[in-house]
Amino acid sequence: MRVLLSKLPRPWIVDEKKDDGYTALHLAALNNHVEVAELLVHQGSASLDIQNVNQQTALHLAVERQHTQIVRLLVRAEAKLDVQDKDGDTPLHEALRHHTLSQLRQLQDMQDVSKVEPWEPSKNTLIMGLGTQGAEKKSAASIACFLAANGADLTIRNKKGQSPLDLCPDPSLCKALAKCHKEKTSGQVGSRSPSLNSNGETLEECMVCSDMKRDTLFGPCGHIATCSLCSPRVKKCLICKDQVQSRTKIEECVVCSDKKAAVLFEPCGHMCACENCASLMKKCVQCRAVVERRTPFVLCCGGKGMEDDAADDDDDDDEDDEDLSE
């Protein structure tokens, strides 16, 4: 492919359509030919937003087939995110429809499993299929969040009058999509490419997918290297190479609920409070263990910083701190 592209007498041949309107990039996206797609985009300068007879772009097809690498490639090459197909669906409509269908199939599988009699283990092989549906659902949700975080419109309606969020019955995912979109529009996400403008921004992104933010605490090492979607795939910590024995999703501060938890308490290993609230605590609010050290989020991500030795704090206000922890 590289040789062909370098020898093309007429560069526009890259965008030639078949009878069904498919270009070479459409076919690469449909069949998950990642290297071919990269060559077409970067070396062949293929047009990213050409539509086939169904008015689908290459991004529509990549999202529909859940080819995450090609979705990432096209979005970072600045493909248009809100092109509508013949039904008025954008790529985000496709991602959320796929997520919903995966949920429905998983529910049906669960109903089928409930009918399996416990004394017939041979029939329980059906349970083995459940993991694939879960992975499929996570992939669709991850793609949807990635599109929203890069500016995909949440309000565009298709020909049935449905917005992307109308196709998503999962309130948690709807909330995540709205948050991703809000961060993009307020300038917090930054450019479509991974931002290297500051060390802090680089440390925030998942070391596996680079699309989502890190939000999972590995135990017992106490490092934060991945998002919750990628963490099950990691067997050894990507920062210290220790075996991962536990994975804990980092939630909001249990004290103020205004910010995300961002301080690791040691020796208990819990991360349950934001920086402001954690600085006031001498006991872990979750397990009541005495806090000997406080490690900030950036240090847990492998960045530079200093641990806060709680032993150096004044011990005069123990009762007040215990009240705060209750």
Image: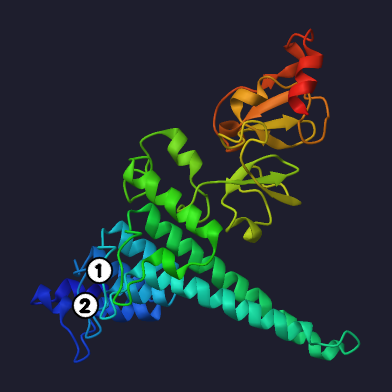
Name the residue that disc number 2 marks: 51
Residue at image point 48% right, 67% down: 168
Q: Position of residue 208 (x, y in %)?
A: 53, 55
**Across the whole image, how many numbered discs are drawn on residues?**
2
Of residue 266 and residue 148, the one placed in the foreground of this image is 148
Mark 1–mark 2 distance (CA, rounded to whole Å): 9 Å
In the figure, residue 297 lies in which quadrant?
top right
- Is residue 36 visible in the rendered image? The answer is no
State the image coordinates of residue 197 (x, y, percent, origin top left). 35, 36
Q: Quadrant of residue 84?
A: bottom left
Q: Is residue 56 above or below residue 42?
A: below
For the residue pair 36 and 91, the one nearer the viewer reads as: 91
The amino acid pointed to by label 2 is Gln
Label drawn at residue 209: none
Which residue is painted at 31% across and 46% down in the image?
Answer: 191
- Which residue is at the front of the view, 215 or 171? 171
Q: Secondary structure at mark 2?
A: loop
Which of pointers 1 and 2 lies earlier in the amino acid sequence? 2
Q: What is the number of the mark on residue 83? A: 1
Q: Is residue 251 above or below residue 119?
A: above
Going by the numbered disc 1, the residue's amino acid type is: Val
x 25%, y 71%: residue: 40
Q: Does any portion of residue 80 appear in the rendered image?
A: yes
From the top left corner, tell me how far across and down residue 170 is, in percent. 54, 64
Dividing the picture into quadrants, the one containing residue 165 is: bottom left
Q: Residue at x 79, y 7 (%)?
A: 316
Tell me which colouring the rendered structure shows: rainbow
Residue found at the very far left of the displayed protein: 10
The answer to whether the residues at label 1 and label 2 have Cβ atoms under 8 Å apart is: yes
16 sits to left or right of 63: left
- From the viewer's perspective, is the residue at label 1 or at label 2 nearer? 1
- Number of residues whose C-alpha sits closer than 10 Å to that of mark 1, classed few (under 14), some (14–19) or many (20 or more): many
